[in-house]
C-alpha cells in the first residue's frame, strides 16, 4: 500500500507540473483561440535557463552560495520564457487570430525551429542540472519518504496558481483579460486595448511554462525534446478540464496525472496510457466541453 | 461538376494530373534503382496526402493522427511479409521475447489477400469508432486535433510496449519475398514502384469522384459553415465520420504500399512528428486541391531527402520556417499561389497562362 501511496504522490507532483504548463495554455486558448504547439518548447527554454544560471553560478560564484542559484533560476526562467512568448505573439501569433487550426500548424513550425536552436546551442545530448542542496532528502511520513524536491514542486505550483488566481480575479488587469475572454468585441468597444491584453496574457502563459521547465530540472535531465514529451498530456488536460477557468485546469491535470499513475500501477506503462486515453474519450461522451466551461450562448463555441 | 474548392476548373485539373502521372511513369528511366525505390516511397506518401486533403482541405477537419492509420496499414502488410519470410516459423522477435506459438490475431495474415484487405479495413474500423464517438458529440476543431494527436501517442506507446506482438521499438523488418517474388531483385522493385503509381492514380480518381458528387459538396459546406449545413438538413456527423473513414483507409493503403518498398515499419513512423509532417505536405502543396496534395507530398519529401542527406540541421530549420511561412502567407499552398499568379496574368490579358503551368510542373 505504501508503494501505491508513493506512486500517487509522484502522480500528484507530475500532475502539478502539467497544471502549471496547462494553465498558460488554457488561458491563451480561452482568450485567443490559439493553440500553441510551441508551448512545450517554452518549457524547454525554462529548463535551459535554469541550466545556464546553474553554470554561471558554478563558474563565477563561490561554492558556498551555489545552492541559491535555484532561487534566481526560477524567476529567470519565467522572465526569459515570457519574453520569448511575447516576441512570438507580436511576430507570428497575431497573424493567426480566428484560425485556430492554422495557429496549431504554424506554432508547430516554431517549435521545430526552437528545438533545433536548442540543439545547436546546447548540443543534442541531455544535460543535467544539479539540484540545490536544500532540496535533497525527504520527509519521512509513516514509512514512506516523500522527497523534498517533489514537495517543493507541489508548493511552487500552488503558489503559482494562487498568483494567477489573484492576478485574474483580483486585479484590474485580470478583469480586462476575463472581459476579453468572454466577449471580445464588447470589451473592445468599452475601450480595452485587446491587442495589448492578448500579448501580455500570452507572455504570462509562456512564463508559467518557463517555471514548469525550471521545476522539471529537479526531476531529471533535460534535452531539446523535453517539451514534446509534455505537450500532448498538457493539451489533454485542457480538453478534459475545459477552457478559460482555472478550476478546470486544476481538475483536468489532477485527473490525468493521478489517472496515469494509478493505471500504470495496476497494469503497465503502455496499457496505463491507453486506459487514460479511453477514459478521456468516454468522459467526453458525457461532457464534450470538459469539466468546466464559461457559459456562452454562441453557436460556434 | 462545377468549380470545387478552388479556382481550378475540372478540365485543367486533369492536365496537371496527367503531367504528374507522366513524369512519375518515365522517372525510373532516368533514376537509379535506389532513387526509384525512394520515389516509390514518396508515391505512397502521396496516396496518404490525398486522404489528408480530403478530410482537412475539403472538410476542414485537422487530424493529427494519420500516422496511426498509415502505421496500421503498414503493420498489416508487414505481418504478412514477415510470416512469408520466416516460412512457417515463428517471427524472430517473438522467439526473442519468449513466445512459443503464433498469437491468434497473427494467423490470418499468413494469407496475402487477407493482409491487404485488413490494411484497408482495420484503419477504417478504428476511424469509424473514434470518429463516431467524437463527431457525434460535436467535438470539433482543435479539440479533435488534440484527441487524434493523443491517439497517435497512444498507439506508439502501445506498439512499443507490446514487444512480443509488434516487435517493439524495432518494428517489423527483414522481409525476403512478396507474393513469392524476391524483394531484393530490381524488377520486383520496379513492379512495386509502378503498382504504387497505379494505386495513386486510383486513389486520385476515387477522391475526385467523391468531391465531384453531392457528398463532396456537403463536405465543403461543412468546412465553410457546419451549422448552416446542419440547418439545411444534412447531418454533419455522418459525413464527417464517412470522410474520416475514407481518409483512414487511404492512409492504410499508403502504409501497405510503403512497407514492401522500404522494408521496415516501426512505431517511429506513426508518432506525432510524422503525423504532423503529413499535414505539412498537404499545406505546402495546397489544401483543397488534390493535385496540391500529391505535389506537396512528393516535393517536400524530395527536398527532405536532398537536404537532410547533407545538412540534417538545416532541414529542421527549413521545415520549421516552411510551416510558419506557408500557413501565414500562403494558406492555399503552392497550387493556390500558382493559381493566384495565373489569374493575375490572365487579368492583364497576357495569353501565356498555359505555358508557365507546364513549366512549373516540369520543374517540380
Image (spheres, coloured by chain):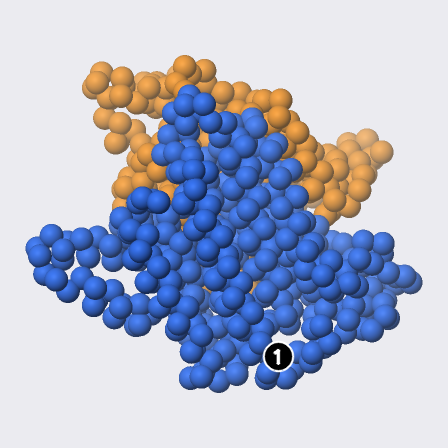
Chain colours: A orange, B blue
Tell me where residue B98 sits by quadrant.
bottom right
Q: Position of residue B67 (x, y in %)?
A: 57, 53
Residue at image coords 81%, 53%: B105
Query: Which residue is situated farthest in the right direction here?
Result: B100
Q: How many marks?
A: 1
Q: Secondary structure at mark 1?
A: helix
At a point 31% along the width and 40% down the height, the residue shown is A96
Instruction: Using the rendered image of the protein, determine whether residue B19 is visible from the camera's viewpoint.
Output: yes
**Closer-to-camera residue (B122/A261):** B122
Please state which of residues A131 and B92 is positioned toward the viewer in this rendering: B92
The answer to whether B296 appears left or right of B44 in the picture is: left
Residue B84: x and y, percent?
77, 71
Chain ID for label 1?
Answer: B
Q: Is residue A10 found left or right of A205 in the rendered image? A: right
Residue at the spot of label 1: B188
Along the line of sight, the residue nearer the viewer: A109 or A62: A109
Q: Residues within 10 Å of mark 1 (few under 14, many from 20)?
A: some
Give residue A143's position: percent from left, percent from top. 83, 35
Kindly identify the residue that appears in the image at 70 percent across and 70 percent down: B173
Vertical placement of B296 versus B153: above or below? below
Q: Is residue B92 above or below residue A12?
A: below
In which image quadrant can residue A291 be found? top right
Quadrant holding the C terminus of chain A: top left
- Residue A12 or residue B346, whichever sits in front: B346
Q: Position of residue B41 (x, y in %)?
A: 53, 69
Quarter of the figure that contains the N terminus of chain A: top right
Vertically, is B136 above or below B297?
above
- Residue at horizontal 21 percent and vertical 53 percent from the top: B340
- Is any part of residue A42 visible from this angle? no
Amino acid at each position: 500500500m505504501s508503494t501505491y501511496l508513493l506512486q500517487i504522490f509522484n502522480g500528484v507532483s507530475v500532475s502539478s507540473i502539467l497544471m502549471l504548463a496547462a494553465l498558460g495554455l488554457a488561458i491563451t486558448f480561452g482568450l485567443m483561440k490559439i493553440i500553441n504547439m510551441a508551448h512545450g518548447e517554452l518549457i524547454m527554454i525554462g529548463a535551459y535557463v535554469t541550466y545556464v544560471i546553474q553554470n554561471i553560478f558554478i563558474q563565477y560564484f563561490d561554492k558556498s552560495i551555489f545552492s541559491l542559484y535555484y532561487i534566481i533560476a526560477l524567476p529567470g526562467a519565467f522572465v526569459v520564457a515570457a519574453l520569448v512568448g511575447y516576441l512570438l505573439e507580436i511576430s507570428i501569433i497575431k497573424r493567426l487570430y480566428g484560425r485556430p487550426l492554422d495557429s496549431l500548424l504554424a506554432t508547430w513550425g516554431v517549435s521545430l525551429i526552437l528545438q533545433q536552436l536548442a540543439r545547436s546551442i546546447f548540443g543534442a545530448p541531455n544535460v543535467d542540472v544539479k539540484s540545490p542542496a536544500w532540496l535533497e532528502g525527504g520527509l519521512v511520513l509513516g514509512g514512506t519518504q516523500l522527497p523534498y524536491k517533489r514537495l517543493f514542486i507541489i508548493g511552487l505550483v500552488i503558489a503559482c496558481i494562487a498568483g494567477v488566481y489573484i492576478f485574474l480575479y483580483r486585479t484590474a488587469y485580470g478583469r480586462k483579460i476575463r472581459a476579453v475572454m468572454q466577449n471580445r468585441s464588447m470589451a473592445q468597444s468599452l475601450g480595452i486595448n485587446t491587442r495589448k491584453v492578448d500579448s501580455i496574457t500570452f507572455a504570462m502563459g509562456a512564463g508559467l511554462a518557463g517555471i514548469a521547465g525550471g521545476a522539471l530540472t529537479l526531476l531529471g535531465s533535460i534535452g531539446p525534446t523535453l517539451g514534446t514529451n509534455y505537450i500532448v498530456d498538457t493539451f489533454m488536460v485542457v480538453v478534459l478540464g475545459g477552457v478559460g477557468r482555472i478550476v478546470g485546469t486544476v481538475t483536468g491535470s489532477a485527473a490525468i496525472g493521478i489517472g496515469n499513475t494509478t493505471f500504470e500501477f495496476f497494469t503497465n506503462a503502455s496499457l496505463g496510457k491507453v486506459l487514460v486515453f479511453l477514459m478521456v474519450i468516454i468522459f467526453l461522451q458525457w461532457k464534450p466541453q470538459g469539466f468546466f466551461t464559461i457559459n456562452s450562448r454562441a453557436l460556434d463555441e | 461538376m462545377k468549380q470545387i474548392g478552388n479556382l481550378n476548373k475540372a478540365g485543367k485539373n486533369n492536365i496537371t494530373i496527367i503531367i504528374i502521372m507522366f513524369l512519375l511513369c518515365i522517372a525510373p528511366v532516368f533514376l537509379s534503382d535506389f532513387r526509384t525505390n525512394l520515389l516509390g516511397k514518396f508515391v505512397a506518401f502521396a496516396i496518404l496526402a490525398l486522404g489528408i486533403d480530403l478530410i482537412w482541405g475539403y472538410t476542414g477537419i485537422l487530424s493529427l493522427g494519420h500516422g496511426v492509420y498509415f502505421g496500421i496499414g503498414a503493420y498489416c502488410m508487414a505481418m504478412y511479409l514477415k510470416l512469408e519470410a520466416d516460412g512457417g516459423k515463428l517471427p524472430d522477435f517473438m522467439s526473442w521475447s519468449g513466445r512459443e506459438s503464433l498469437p491468434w490475431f497473427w494467423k490470418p495474415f499468413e494469407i496475402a489477400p487477407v493482409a491487404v484487405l485488413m490494411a484497408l479495413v482495420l484503419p477504417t474500423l478504428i476511424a469509424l469508432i473514434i470518429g463516431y464517438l467524437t463527431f457525434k458529440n460535436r467535438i470539433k476543431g482543435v479539440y479533435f486535433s488534440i484527441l487524434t494527436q493523443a491517439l497517435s501517442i497512444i498507439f506508439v506507446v502501445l506498439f512499443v510496449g507490446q514487444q512480443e506482438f509488434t516487435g517493439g521499438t524495432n518494428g517489423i523488418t527483414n522481409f525476403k519475398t512478396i507474393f513469392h517474388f524476391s524483394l531484393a531483385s530490381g524488377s520486383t522493385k520496379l513492379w512495386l514502384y509502378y503498382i504504387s503509381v497505379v494505386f495513386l492514380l486510383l486513389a486520385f480518381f476515387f477522391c475526385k469522384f467523391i468531391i465531384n458528387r453531392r457528398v463532396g459538396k456537403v463536405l465543403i459546406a461543412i468546412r465553410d459553415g457546419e451549422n448552416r449545413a446542419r440547418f439545411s438538413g444534412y447531418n454533419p456527423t455522418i459525413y464527417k465520420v464517412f470522410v474520416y473513414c475514407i481518409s483512414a483507409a487511404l492512409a492504410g493503403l499508403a502504409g501497405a504500399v510503403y512497407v514492401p518498398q522500404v522494408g521496415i515499419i516501426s512505431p517511429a513512423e506513426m508518432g506525432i512528428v510524422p503525423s504532423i509532417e503529413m499535414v505539412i505536405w498537404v499545406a505546402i502543396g495546397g489544401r483543397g486541391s488534390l493535385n496540391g496534395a500529391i505535389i506537396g507530398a512528393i516535393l517536400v519529401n524530395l527536398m527532405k531527402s536532398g537536404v537532410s542527406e547533407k545538412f540534417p540541421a538545416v532541414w529542421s530549420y527549413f521545415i520549421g520556417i516552411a510551416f510558419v511561412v506557408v500557413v501565414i502567407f500562403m494558406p492555399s499552398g503552392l497550387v493556390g499561389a500558382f493559381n493566384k499568379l495565373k489569374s493575375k496574368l490572365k487579368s492583364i490579358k497576357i495569353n501565356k497562362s498555359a505555358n508557365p503551368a507546364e513549366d512549373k510542373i516540369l520543374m517540380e
